[in-house]
Image (cartoon, rainbow, N blue to C red):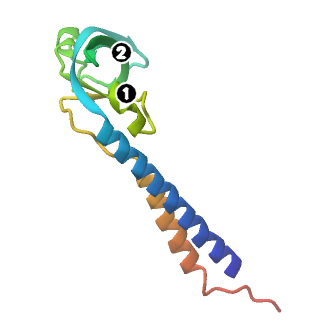
């Protein structure tokens, strides 16, 4: 059990290092990227199931002083109580595109990453949290099984 405990703690430390790496890369992307307001050119709604629809947006935005187009796909649940909005309402939605400008591409590990954000130009940091949760679980598990020993007869 001692070796399993040590392996769990070591694995937890490795997962923590992966989490630090992920947070550092995410921080670099947040510092290098910028968000611009996008205009919705077209919206297409495809029904996947009876209560789930796929919404395909075609967005145009200004990227490094030139217009650029991106296709953004999302899905939405709907029912009788919460119906799908009309195409006009979907087309009037405010979208932001976060990208890395050409002059800052060397500052990040993700120079070609695009995020489409609804109603805000803020950046949501989600990278690395699962690594730290796994780290905590493995280190906790390693210390919990440390006092147990296999009884040999």
Task: Residue 14: give x, y in percent of width and height.
Answer: 56, 62
Quadrant into which the N terminus falls: bottom right
- In the image, residue 82 sits, relative to residue 126, either above or below, namely above
Q: Mark 2 falls on what kind of element?
A: strand
Q: Nearer the viewer, residue 73 or 15?
A: 15
- Secondary structure state at the residue bearing disc 1: loop
User: How packed is label 1: few (under 14 Cα within 10 Å), some, or many (20 or more)?
Assistant: some
According to the picture, the residue beneath numbered tag 2 turns out to be 70
Alpha carbon separation for disc pair 2 and 1 = 9 Å
For image coordinates 44% across by 57% down, the residue present is: 20
Left or right, 89 with reference to 73: left
User: With respect to residue 44, does 98 lie above or below?
Assistant: below
Looking at the image, which residue is at 35% across and 33% down? Answer: 104
CB contact under 8 Å: marks 2 and 1: yes
**Horizontal and vertical percent position of residue 43:** 29, 10
Residue 114's label in the rendered image is: 1
Residue 54 visible in rendering: no
């Amino acid at each position: 059990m001692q070796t399993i405990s040590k392996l769990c703690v070591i694995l937890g430390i490795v997962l923590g290092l992966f989490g630090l790496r992920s947070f550092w890369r995410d921080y670099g992307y947040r510092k290098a990227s910028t968000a611009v307001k996008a205009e919705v050119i077209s919206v297409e709604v495809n029904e996947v199931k009876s209560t789930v629809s796929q919404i395909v947006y075609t967005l145009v935005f200004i990227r490094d002083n030139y217009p650029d187009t991106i296709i953004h796909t999302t899905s939405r649940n709907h029912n009788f109580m919460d119906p799908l909005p009309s195409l006009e309402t979907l087309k009037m939605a405010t979208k932001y595109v976060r990208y890395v400008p050409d002059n800052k591409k060397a500052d990040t590990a993700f120079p070609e990453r695009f995020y489409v954000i609804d109603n805000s130009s803020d950046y949501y940091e989600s990278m690395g949290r699962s690594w730290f949760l796994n780290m905590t679980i493995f280190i906790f598990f390693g210390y919990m099984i440390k006092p147990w020993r296999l009884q040999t007869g």
